Amino acid sequence: MSTAGLDDFGELFALPFVQNALIACAVLGVVAGLLTPMIVSRGMSFAVHGTSELALTGGAAALLAGVEVGLGAIVGAVVAGLVFGLLALRERERDSVMGVVLAFGLGLGVLMLALYDGRASNKFGLLTGSIVSVDGTNLYVLAVVAVLVIGVLAVVFRPLLFASTDPDVALARGVPVRALSLVFAVLIGLTTALAVPIVGSILVLAVMIVPGAGANRVTANPALATLLAVVIAEVSLLGGALLSLSTDLPISGFVAAIAFVAYLTCRLVARLRTRSPARA
């Protein structure tokens, strides 16, 4: 790379909004990577999608009211987590409850966005993400919520893993399965709320699902799967942020593309590993 190109990159990284964006992506990658393998193993991918719609509703309400969009997204996502945790505890009811809440949240969010008379970029950012909108306030809220999620997850990880692997045996051993399901749903809501302003509500699955789906294909070890999911989430978010900043295009498309390539790579690695013993 030429000296001029390096100077351009140096000037880009020196900008405060670029630094905020990269820090936000790095923090989100850690939090999402920690949760996503268990989201996939518990079959809660649809819950993430429903939660993102309620986060969109909360963000749209905040936009309409003129308050911090990130806080509105957090409120909406936490409400979604509580609803899913309280009403969808039975597996046979899960999909129908989530579908009802998703439809309600999406309809209400679209209505609020239609009533908003401000800049169109603000509305578009809620749908596809806006990496340049991350400021000091957003970063502070992101850091506080991230510490909260990681702290709670560290406390409940072992019983939550037990309840996710074999809920019937865990319930018989006295593990509070219902309470853990509710807590985990709220953690999903908080993390999804952090992701929506950055990658948008449409493609939040690229951060909350794809890293865990890829990691779980490679290994059944929970620790290794979590570590791999964090790496995939970090590469996807930071790579997407750099591409978005250099091209002035929405970050969500780049994040989704990188995450998808990582998922295909994990599937290829898993296939090669299963074929190798057969050949031997």
Image: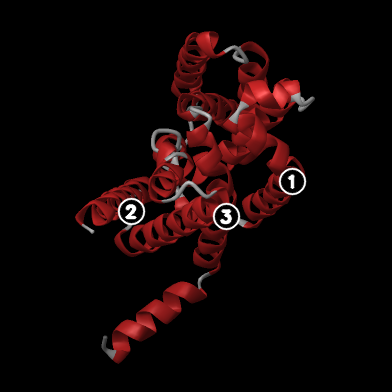
Q: Position of residue 253 (x, y in %)?
A: 32, 46
Where does label 1 land, which residue? 148
Q: Is residue 219 left or right of residue 279?
A: right
**How far is the residue under mark 3 from the one under mark 2?**
16 Å
**How far is the residue under mark 3 from the one under mark 1?**
13 Å
Q: Which residue shows up at 57% across the image and 53% down it?
A: 223
| Crowd class of label 2 (few under 14; some 14 to 19; many from 20; radius 10 Å) | many
User: Can the viewer see residue 256 in this picture?
Assistant: yes
Where does label 3 land, which residue? 30
Q: Nearer the viewer, residue 117 or 236?
A: 236
Q: Nearer the viewer, residue 93 or 244?
A: 93
Where does label 2 land, which residue? 262
The quadrant of the rendering that contains the C terminus is bottom left
As helix, strand or loop, the secondary structure at mark 2 comes to helix
As helix, strand or loop, the secondary structure at mark 1 comes to helix
Give the amino acid at mark 3.
Val
Counting residues from the N terminus, which is met first, the one under dot 1 or under dot 2?
1
